[in-house]
C-alpha cells in the first residue's frame, strides 16, 4: 500500500504544480438562447426572486472549480456571501427587477477567482470532458488533465441559468499547453475518496459514450462540441463550436 500511496501523491502533486496541461476558456453563453443570453449579460433571469435565490445557492453548492463555504445566507434581503480558501470570496445579491424578472448582481471583492482544476476526459471519446468526477466505477474510463481557469460574474450567471433550465455544465474550451503532455492518465485509486457524482450536480449537456486514446496536443475540447474537430495547422489549438 505504501508504494501505491507514494505514486498517488506524486501524481496528484504534478497536477498542482508546474504548468497546467490545458488553459481553459469558459464559454458561459454558448448553448443559451439568444434572447436569454442578452438578458443574462445584464444579470437578469425570467424567474421570481425566491426561485433565483435558490438557484444561486445551488450554484455555490455544486460549482466544480472552487469549494465554497457559505458565510452568509440572507433570504429576506436576497444576499449570499461565500468564500473559497484564502482571500477568495464572492457576494451575490438577488432583487426583483419587475415584469416577472429578477436581477442577480455578482461581486468578487477580494482576489480574482483563479484556480487549477482537474478535468476528466473520456478515453473512448475525448470530446466528452467535464470538471465533475464520474461515478467511482467509471474512473478507469477517464483520463485526468489539469487546466487553469478563472471564474467571473457571467460564469456564475450562466451556471444559475443552467440550474434553472437543464442542469448542464457551463461549456468551456481547452487549449493544450504545448510544453505539457496533453493527457495525464491516472489509475482509479488516484481519484478522491468522496467523488461528486455527475448526476448529483449540473452535468455536461452532451451524453457520454464509453472511454481511450488521449486527444492530440493540437485539439481543442468543449463539453458542448458534438465532434472533435482536427487541429488547425497554423496553431496548436482552435475554438470548437461557436463562441457566444
Image (cartoon, rainbow, N blue to C red):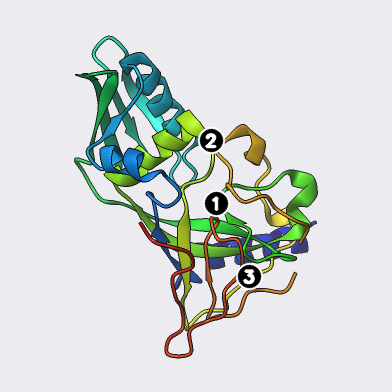
Left or right of residue 176: residue 71? left
Residue in the picture at 30% in, 39% down: 40
The image quadrant where one finds the C terminus is bottom left
Q: Secondary structure at mark 1?
A: loop
Q: Residue at x 35, y 14 (%)?
A: 50
Instruction: Tell me if residue 78 comes above or below residue 5 in the rendering.
Output: above
The reply to whether the C-beta atoms of the residues labelled 3 and 2 are less than 8 Å apart is no
Mark 1–mark 3 Cα distance, whole angstroms, equals 15 Å
Of tags 1 and 3, the one toward the viewer is 1
Using a 10 Å C-alpha cutoff, classify the residue at mark 2 as few (fewer than 14 neighbours), some (14 to 19) or many (20 or more): few
Looking at the image, residue 174 lies above or below residue 92: below
* Real-space Cα separation, disc 3 to disc 2, in angstroms: 30 Å
Residue ID at (54%, 42%): 168
Left or right: where 172 falls relative to 5 = left
User: Which label was assigned to residue 166?
Assistant: 2
* Residue 79 figure quarter: top left
Of mark 3 and mark 2, the one earlier in the sequence is 2
Above or below, comparing residue 197 to residue 210 in the picture = above
Q: Nearer the viewer, residue 37 or 174?
A: 37
Question: Which residue in the protein does label 3 denote?
Answer: 184
Q: Is residue 210 above or below residue 62?
A: below
Of circles 3 and 2, the one toward us is 2
Instruction: State left or right for residue 1 relative to residue 82.
Output: right
Name the spot of residue 139 as percent of width and height, x first: 74, 53
Image position of 215 (left or right of 209): left
Q: Position of residue 190 (x, y in %)?
A: 69, 56
The residue labelled by disc 1 is 131
Task: Specify which label sits upstream in the sequence, 2 or 1.
Answer: 1
Does label 1 or label 3 sit earlier along the sequence? Answer: 1
Amino acid at each position: 500500500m505504501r508504494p501505491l500511496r507514494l505514486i498517488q501523491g506524486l501524481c496528484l502533486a504534478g497536477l498542482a504544480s508546474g504548468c497546467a496541461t490545458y488553459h481553459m476558456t469558459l464559454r458561459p453563453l454558448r448553448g443559451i438562447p439568444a434572447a436569454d443570453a442578452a438578458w443574462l449579460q445584464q444579470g437578469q433571469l425570467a424567474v421570481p426572486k425566491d426561485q433565483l435565490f435558490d438557484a444561486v445557492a445551488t450554484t455555490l453548492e455544486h460549482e466544480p472549480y472552487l469549494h465554497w463555504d457559505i458565510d452568509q445566507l440572507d433570504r429576506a434581503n436576497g444576499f449570499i456571501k461565500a468564500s473559497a480558501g484564502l482571500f477568495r470570496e464572492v457576494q451575490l445579491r438577488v432583487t426583483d427587477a419587475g415584469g416577472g424578472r429578477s436581477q442577480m448582481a455578482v461581486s468578487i471583492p477580494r482576489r480574482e477567482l483563479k484556480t487549477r482544476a482537474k478535468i476528466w476526459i473520456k478515453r473512448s471519446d475525448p470530446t466528452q470532458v467535464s470538471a465533475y468526477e464520474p461515478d467511482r466505477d467509471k474512473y478507469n474510463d477517464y483520463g485526468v488533465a489539469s487546466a487553469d481557469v478563472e471564474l467571473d460574474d457571467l460564469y456564475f450567471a450562466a451556471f444559475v441559468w443552467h440550474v434553472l433550465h437543464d442542469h448542464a455544465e457551463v461549456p468551456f474550451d481547452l487549449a493544450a499547453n504545448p510544453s505539457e503532455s496533453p493527457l495525464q492518465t491516472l489509475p482509479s485509486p488516484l481519484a478522491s475518496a468522496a467523488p461528486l457524482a455527475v448526476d448529483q450536480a449540473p452535468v455536461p449537456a452532451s451524453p457520454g459514450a464509453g472511454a481511450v486514446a488521449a486527444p492530440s496536443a493540437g485539439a481543442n475540447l468543449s463539453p458542448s462540441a458534438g465532434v472533435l474537430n482536427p487541429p488547425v495547422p497554423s496553431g496548436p489549438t482552435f475554438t470548437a463550436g461557436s463562441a457566444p
